[in-house]
Amino acid sequence: MTDSPAVQTPLDPKEQPILDNLLQLRDRLSLLKQDKTTYIKSPDVIALYHAVVEQVHLLNVIRAENIDNVLDDCFQLISLFFLTIGRNSEAPAVYSMTSTIRRLLDHLKEAAFFTAKDLESIGQRLDDMQETLQRGKETHSPHLLTLLANQLTTCRGILEQLRISLAGLSPELTPTHERLVSILRSISAANTRTKFPASEVQGFRDQLNEIKGTMVDGKFIGADGTVPTGQEIVDTLLDRCFLWSEIVLERQGQIDERFKSTYDKLLEIRNCLERLSLTQAWSLRETDLYNYQRQLDRIDEGRINGNFEDAFGKPADLHAQRTLLYLLRRSYAYIYGLIISSEPVSEALLPVFNQLQTLRRCLIEVRRSGGVSSARELYPYSLKLNSIDSMRVDGKFQVGSDIPEGQGSVSSLLAQCFELAYELRVEAEEKDNESE
């Protein structure tokens, strides 16, 4: 909890008991998160969720400004717990996503380079979350729903500002704009490599020269010979790319020593999240993201007027500033991706779910490559599927006496695998009959 913002002393003495209760609840949530000896059980999470909501209700009676640092910690943890137990489509699970999207949108606005596809993806996600809140009206606290609705409204407001900034970009210039955004991001990624890839960055600079070479009298020309709208947007971005590539080549990946510790910490977080995104299905417990979120929040909120400053209050130079911001944005983007790809299945059922996903991919690949020559080749698949099917009790996958969340997802996947295996067996038998 050391990375959580400092707890502010309540102004009203009546709030002290509520703060004490919230601190206890946060501690209980943290202990539950750290316990890796068993899987997270739904009843434990739901009980803590209701306890936090009860404190919110008490706090609302005293004051309207009901979200402080401790309460935010509690809701953030509960949100990730809901993902861990497979209740992704319920309102509490939305909280962590809204705070992550808010960070991403703020950073996109600050960086001032992004594509329409970036905004489209986030917009779709906000729509999905809005539907989740609508479904939760009858089952979840109106206090939580109001809080989440306000956060979504804020996110939509920033998103609209970003959309307006790209409104003047013509369809003809969109591919060039997207390519420049990709190059700028690639240069930033290369800038944080352990061994600086000078030739790779020079290659990106060559691409920039190639793009600039398509301009006529300083303008991008459309297929019909006219000048498309959005020249300033693309031209400004091209200049930024040239400037950034020049700075990166000059610095050769060496960060200002004043910001080396912050750089190392952000680099470590980015690398850990990158590894998690590669092995997510087998190694991620969503609550693990909480520590990364809080470390990033602490660094992000430590900036002064958007700038990283050293111990003496002197701001970072352009190279350090952009490098640290890139790592910060990239880390939040990984968290966003990990939350999005979280499966609606309790961690108790994830081993079975992951095995079935692997089996399904294998069976699809077998079908793509021409099927099997005889039904005997499907024996290993059938053996594994029957083994998993036999784990069910009265049609449910149980762990002890518990029936974890995600039964529908796992059963559907099992049925798909059986169907694929059956189709491959029929095809193999037809081939046998034809050869005979």
Image: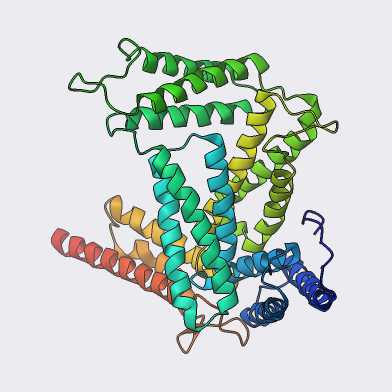
Outermost residue, bottom side: 394
- Residue 329 percent location from the top left of the image: 59, 41
- Residue 401 percent location from the top left of the image: 62, 88
Residue 427, quarter of picture: bottom left
Count of marks overlaid on the render: 0
Question: Which residue is nearer to you in this view: 249 or 420?
Answer: 249
Residue 192, quarter of picture: top right
- What residue lies at 82% left-to-right and 68% top-to-bottom? 11
- Residue 429 percent location from the top left of the image: 22, 66
Q: Is residue 427 left or right of residue 396?
A: left
Q: Is residue 403 above or below residue 112?
A: below
For the N terminus, give its image quadrant. bottom right
Q: Is residue 424 left or right of residue 132?
A: left
Question: Which residue is nearer to you in this view: 71 or 364?
Answer: 71
Q: Is residue 307 left or right of residue 176?
A: right
Question: Which residue is nearer to you in this view: 410 or 9?
Answer: 9
For the C terminus, give its image quadrant. bottom left
- What residue lies at 59% left-to-right and 76% top-to-bottom? 143
- Residue 57 percent location from the top left of the image: 67, 80
- What residue lies at 57% left-to-right and 31% top-to-bottom? 189
Q: Is residue 58 left or right of residue 177?
A: right
Outermost residue, top side: 217
Q: How is the image coloured?
A: rainbow
Tell me if I can see residue 201 in this picture. Answer: yes
- What residue lies at 72% left-to-right and 64% top-to-bottom? 68
Q: Is residue 68 above or below residue 61?
A: above
Tell me if I can see residue 380 in this picture. Answer: no
Residue 288, quarter of picture: bottom right
